[in-house]
Amino acid sequence: MAPVMFAALVLFLLLGYPVAFALAANGLFFALVGIELGLFQENFLQALPERIYGTMNNDVLLAIPFFTFMGLVLERSGMAEDLLDTIGQLFGPIRGGLAYAVIFVGALLAATTGVVAASVISMGLISLPIMLRYGYDRRLATGVIAASGTLAQIIPPSLVLIVLADQLGRSVGDMYEGAFIPGLVLSGLYAGYVFLVTMVWPKRAPGLPPEAQTLRDADGQTRRFSLLVVTIIAFALAIAYMKLFTKVGGGADFVILTMSIAVAISFVIALINKLLKLNLLSRMTEQVIFVMVPPLALIFLVLGTIFIGVATPTEGGAMGAAGAILLAWAKKRMTFDLLRQATESTAKLSAFVLFILVGARVFSLTFYGVNGHVWVEHLLVGLPGGATGFLIVVNVMVFLLAFFLDFFELAFIIVPLLGPAADKLGIDLIWFGVILGVNMQTSFMHPPFGFALFFLRSVAPKNAYKDKITGKMMEPVTTGQIYWGAVPFVVIQCIMVALVVLFPQMVMHYKSSGVQLDQQQINKQLDSISIPGLGGSGGGLPGLDLNAPPTLNLK
């Protein structure tokens, strides 16, 4: 009955029924059929209310509305616009500079917002017209924007990582720490592709002309080297402070605290320079520091506190939401209308996630009741090649399913079936979760159903238009150009899946920051414990042997 249930679910999804209702209806229908056929025990259904209440009572899932709200407030507060404008000026003169800026800002937005739609739409509205204005190839421009927006899927605080950790029964903090390096490596691969394009086809990604570079000093110079000098001084002082005044010697704690202190020092330097009008820093350096500090401070507030163990992911999300409100207020953009829109969108997404999860609980109850999990486990564990064969088959399957299902549906339907089999094969579930997270990221980029492509299509020009700056008539961006632009980045994402599989230490470093227990020391301490009056050095009862098996005297 389990294969029939799964096939029926796939059929309902392909027919277009809402996922949550298709899951719940399948579960209840096959439960009734199973009771009639004697394949399913009806007392299983008594556990259904408790399972649904357990879902509603799950503290881990509270992080989803917090991070969603944080991302929506930041997106509407204009942070993305300021970042793209400033970083675009910083990288602009070099070939592909605007594309590098989009990737860099996409990674920063991913580490602060965690919402793909917000990142893609923001960068599509702000960067795409500028890239088209200065002659960027349309396929490269749209592909970079869509791919950089999807970094929010794998760089913490990603919503999909929260769901994956919950479904695999692992810590969200460990999942975040494990996914951080793969997210940065993927950003580097995107930048590497842009560099390759600029080497082979220079005209597809030209640098900004001099007249477009507005962040200049009074004499017309940009003086980017002053930014490098400030960065070196700030990090040198931060490392010196950590060595002299703290006992933190290495690991994630050292990196996070050092970066936080360096950011604070650079901000103080820029602030003193501006207030006292010392003119030691260039206009561009000041602008870059003032624009970069708020998101970096928010990243430390959220991810830093989670990584060093000060806050749980849910608490980190709450602090991030509060920090986003303060940033919007500081920029004088916090209005009641902004707050209402962010709250409504957060409520919709949270309800969407909860309904799918409730439907998945109903389906899985029946599926487990007919031993479906045993069928799936035997099917996957028995694959040729052991753990390697399992990983290959699972990744190919998830890649193909991502053409039709989004990441929430994959996480709630497929992952609970794959997790036990992976665990039985001895695969680390955090590593497995990150592999699946990188793979599921392709669901946003697959033509023709990729959501990131739809988001970009909604803001890309559909008709010819007149550019406001140059006055030239610009050609529209076609859907075909958006789809073809996404293909190289889907290939890069597949390469990233292979890299995470081949180099597991990219993820497994999360174990080094955990609390390590020495079992021998624990045993010694347990052996040295003596209970007064029950033997040992504290005295004891005569004739009482604690190691003897218990006896029962019924005389």
Image: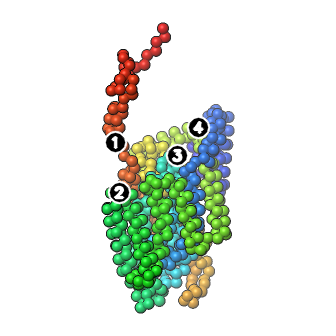
Q: Amino acid at mark 1?
A: Asp
Residue receiving disc 2: 248
Query: Which residue is found at the position 64% from the left and 69% from the top?
Result: 338
Residue receiving disc 1: 518
On screen, residue 119 above or below 361:
below
Per the model, the C-alpha gap separating discs 2 and 1 is 21 Å
Query: Which residue is found at the position 38% from the left and 19% from the top?
Result: 541
On screen, residue 14 above or below 209:
above
Q: Amino acid at mark 2?
A: Val
Residue receiving disc 3: 417
Left or right: 314 as drawn, with respect to 524: right
Q: Amino acid at mark 4?
A: Val
**Which label number is shown at residue 370?**
4
Query: Which residue is found at the position 62% from the left and 56% from the top?
Result: 350
The N terminus - image quarter: top right
Task: Work out whether residue 510 can be spotted.
Answer: yes
Per the model, the C-alpha gap separating discs 3 and 4 is 14 Å
- Viewer-side residue, 499 vs 521: 521
Mark 3 or mark 2, earlier in chain: 2
Per the model, the C-alpha gap separating discs 3 and 2 is 41 Å
Contact between labelled residues 1 and 2, with CB atoms less than 8 Å apart: no
Left or right: 219 as drawn, with respect to 321: left
Residue 386 is situated, as x and y percent measured from the top left of the image, at 40, 45
